[in-house]
Image (cartoon, coloured by chain):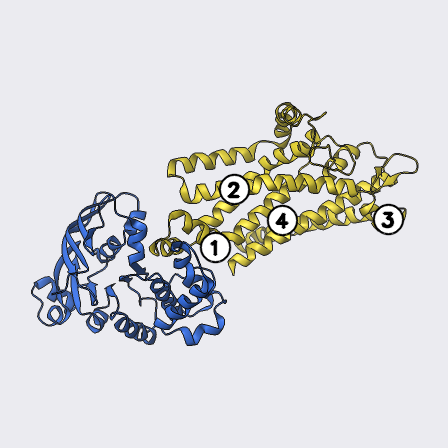
Amino acid sequence: MKMPKIITKNLNLWYGKFHALKDVNACFEDKRITAIIGPSGCGKSTLLRVFNRMNDLIEGVKMKGEVLISGANMLAKEADLVNLRKKVGMVFQRPNPFPLSIYENIVFGEKIHAEKIKKSRLEEIVEKSLDSVLLWNELKDRLNKSALSLSLEQRQRLCIARLIAVKPDILLMDEPCSALDPQSTQRIEELMRELKKNYTIIIVTHNMQQAARVSDDAGFMLLGELIEFGRTDGIFTTPQDKRTEDYITGRYG
Amino acid sequence: MRKFKEFIIEKLILFSGLASIFFVVLIFLFLLKEGLAVFKTVGFFDFLLGKKWYPISEPARLGILPLILGSLLVTLGAALISIPIGVGCAVYIAEVAPLKIKEILKAGIELLAAIPSVVLGFIGMVTLVPWVKHMFKIPTGLTALSGSIMLAFMAMPTIVSIAEDALYSVPKAYKEGALALGATHWQAIYRVIVPAASPGIMAAVMLGLGRVIGETMAVMMITGNAAVIPRSILEPVRTLTATIAAEMGEAVVGSEHYFALFAVGIVLFVISFAINVGADLFLHKENK
């Protein structure tokens, strides 16, 4: 059996006095897509943002427990956030390319991390990254155009390409398709299936069909608790917990 | 009855709106009428590029190049001081400072903006001028440099508050995106946030400089008012504004000198107008 990529042990998180994550225990396996589902406000985005410590930007956040990523505890005081975020990339709900050129967006990561920057290397990175999100042929002639001139779907792909350029192991996706139309959503999902060959992907979505379509594993969250976690087939066909079943069959949410 | 009330109020508002435009046009026409009269006796380029300003000698020499250079030198000096400090301060307030320090700083900046220019000029005269004289071992501290430093203080509130607004309105998603890629806070600031806010920051700089170039009282008090072409920033200069303020009271109405001062006013108006239009273009670019 493969070693899980991310393990959480008794993970608790508070925003001030609000207890947002309660004793979350889960294992996320390598080279698979894991979906986290649940109604709004259940803590699924919060859980995702623990994995790259984006919650740290919010004032008054307190975390307890352990998050082991490739074996190292990321909640430890000495955890290196810059390296963590290099290894664990995040795609946001609204595509957020920087207001720079397409080229500059992709080489951003290399420019902030590399000691020496070679132009030929940057060009290689741009081609490879855009190619892996199937944008290279579309955009190769307009790399110097502003990234804000792209369509929403292209922007989201560009954001994924920008991540891939930093060579992460894990891709966190926070409702990556909620701003997109159904066709674009379908194409991004195809891209995710392609990407899982090389990356561990965790996606947060409140679109249950999407979770069922793309994920291998799934977790259901409610009010800060991870109610059920397992193979997607199992969760959707034979949920063990009554609450999971109620949510999946649409009784609330 | 209600309709009548509406009608009256509507017309009153319309009148207020038109009044402001009407007065601007009147001022502009008056300025043009009085100012252009000087070109009956002095050539256009002799006036703009003439190196000597002796308005009451016989015959009068009316070249305003020393005044233009004086204004530009003081403004340039003020820009070199106020832009880095002002933008740096804005970045600190918008991105780095903890909430409490942020509030204190913002209040301080507003207070700085509230100090009347004559008071700043007065303080400059008794503190800054002797200091400059002592520091550089020059015969007088009434120099372009003193004016630049003092004016930098006056430009700072404008630059800081507008640049801070521009930085603050950069979508948080940009910052999150940069940090999520492993950027440090500083890298996120100078690679993403500042470039994204740059149109607003440029506008802030332009508006700050607009204030500097139009400022009269403080520069008149501390720049020495010698209408000669400055060779260094450690010499006394005279600005366009100070010239008008100092000489208008003495000029005989209808004389060449009087018309020349109005023409100086036109030059000043053109410069300020250009700066404001520039600032507007930058702000507009941001909205697109």
| Residue under the image location 42 percent in, 76 percent down | A137
The 10 Å Cα crowd at callout 3, few under 14, some 14 to 19, many 20 or more, is some
In the rendered image, residue A221, in percent from the top left (x then y), is placed at 17, 59
Residue to which mark 4 is pinned: B16
In this view, the residue in front, B40 or A174, is: A174
Amino acid under disc 1? Ala
| Residue under the image location 53 percent in, 54 percent down | B199
Residue to which mark 2 is pinned: B160
Amino acid under disc 2? Val
Of label 4 and label 3, which has the lower sequence position? 4
Q: Chain of mark 4?
A: B
Of label 4 and label 2, which has the lower sequence position? 4
Of label 2 and label 1, which has the lower sequence position? 2
The image shows residue A232, relative to residue B150, as above or below, that is below
| Residue under the image location 84 percent in, 50 percent down | B44
In the rendered image, residue A161, in percent from the top left (x then y), is placed at 36, 66
Kindly indicate whether the residues beneath marks 4 and 2 are on one polypeptide chain: yes
Kindly indicate whether the residues beneath marks 3 and 1 are on one polypeptide chain: yes
In the rendered image, residue A170, in percent from the top left (x then y), is placed at 26, 61
Q: Is residue A197 visible?
A: yes
Local SS, label 1: helix
Q: Which chain is yellow?
A: B
Number of the label disc, if any, that sits on residue B196: 1
Nearest-to-viewer mark from 4 and 2? 2
Q: Is residue B19 visible?
A: no
Question: Farthest residue in the right direction?
Answer: B58
Residue to which mark 3 is pinned: B39
The image shows residue B161, relative to residue A54, as above or below, that is above
